[in-house]
Image (tube, helix red, strand yellow):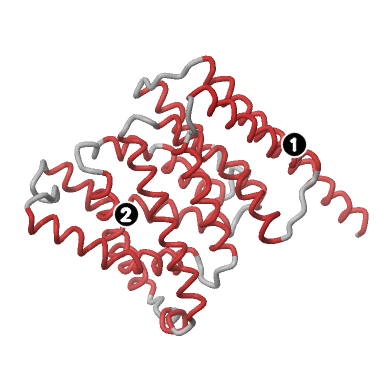
């Protein structure tokens, strides 16, 4: 597996997503909504350049001519924008640990949505994992005195985004390009408004911050492109296991680099979620080996 290029692509994607808190922390003097609009604007410009280099434009007219496709990607763009904003705001407001919780919970929410909307069936251990994760969130809610809303918004927006993209007809690059195109004009309009009113940061702050705002498009698109390349080269189960690299790195960054508080009560709640993930991954691995064995015996 180590010699498989897909493994390294996946490691690169999840590793970059894992260190994203450091990137957004470097921009913490810029309002989160302004960062979001720069991310939308520069992402489309970068993706358009990638499409131009590849000469990959033939998909665009057929996609825009199908109202269902446009509606799917308009909806996924809104979900993606909400997810990005919540994540950027959470990181810069000092809630990196809670944002990591959202991405630990996300796979289990995705499984639940598969049951509710795609009629997928769960095995008993998978139901137990979802129940245990719910217990962890409930415990954290009681401990906080309020819902860990940042984690839940991140988990559910990305899970619903994944649900829409699962049924969407475009590739990862094409889909992200269409999503950022949906968001581009409002985002650009907002940035122009900030510039006119003198409230914008771009070009009016230090050079590093201006560069990081412009580079946000590359920072957004590159891990997504790496992930798309990885998904074509390694098994889905491998991708599923490696996805926990990102929230693990985010959690470690929050606790050990930015010294966010992490109490024993939080440790207990997180441990329930981590145990739920271990149950889910373990059950998936056992089921996968069982299917392989059945295919081998069938041959």
Image marks 2 and 1: residues in contact by CB distance under 8 Å: no
Q: Position of residue 92 (x, y in %)?
A: 30, 35
Image: 184 above or below 242 = below
Residue at 27% x, 44% y: name it.
Answer: 32
Residue at numbered disc 2? 218
Query: Observer-nearest residue: 168 or 135?
Result: 135
Residue at numbered disc 1? 128
Q: Counting other residues with Cα less than 10 Å from the Cα at mark 1, is it few (<14), some (14-19), or many (20 or more)?
A: some
Q: Residue furthest top?
A: 264
Residue at 32% x, 69% y: name it.
Answer: 48
- For residue 114, the mark is none
Q: Counting other residues with Cα less than 10 Å from the Cα at mark 2, is it few (<14), some (14-19), or many (20 or more)?
A: some
**Element type at mark 2:** helix
Q: Position of residue 260 (x, y in %)?
A: 38, 22
In which quadrant will I find the C terminus?
A: bottom right
Residue at 40% x, 52% y: name it.
Answer: 82
**Element type at mark 1:** helix
Residue at 52% x, 77% y: name it.
Answer: 68
């Amino acid at each position: 597996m180590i010699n498989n290029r897909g493994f390294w692509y996946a490691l690169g994607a999840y590793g970059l997503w894992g260190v994203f808190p450091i990137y957004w922390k470097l921009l913490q003097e810029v309002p989160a909504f302004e960062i979001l609009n720069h991310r939308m604007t520069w992402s489309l410009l970068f993706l358009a350049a990638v499409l131009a280099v590849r000469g990959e434009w033939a998909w665009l007219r057929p996609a825009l001519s199908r109202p269902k496709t446009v509606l799917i990607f308009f909806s996924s763009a809104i979900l993606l924008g909400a997810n990005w904003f919540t994540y950027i705001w959470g990181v810069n407001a000092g809630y990196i640990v809670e944002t990591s919780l959202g991405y630990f919970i996300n796979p289990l929410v995705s499984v639940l949505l598969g049951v509710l909307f795609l009629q997928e069936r769960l095995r008993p251990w998978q139901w137990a994992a979802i129940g245990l994760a719910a217990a962890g969130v409930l415990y954290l809610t009681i401990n906080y005195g309020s819902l860990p809303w940042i984690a839940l918004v991140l988990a559910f927006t990305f899970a619903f985004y994944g649900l829409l993209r699962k049924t969407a007809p475009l590739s990862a690059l094409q889909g992200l390009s269409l999503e950022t195109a949906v968001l581009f004009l409002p985002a650009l309009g907002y940035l122009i408004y900030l510039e006119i009113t003198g409230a914008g940061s771009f070009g009016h702050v230090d050079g590093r911050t201006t560069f990081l705002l412009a580079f946000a498009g590359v920072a957004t698109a590159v891990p997504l492109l790496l992930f798309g390349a990885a998904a074509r080269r390694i098994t889905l189960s491998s991708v599923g296991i490696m996805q926990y690299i990102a929230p693990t790195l985010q959690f470690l960054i929050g606790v050990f680099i930015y010294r966010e508080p992490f109490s024993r009560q939080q440790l207990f709640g997180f441990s329930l979620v981590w145990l739920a993930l271990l149950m889910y991954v373990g059950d998936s691995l056992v089921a996968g080996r069982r299917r392989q064995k059945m295919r081998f015996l069938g041959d």
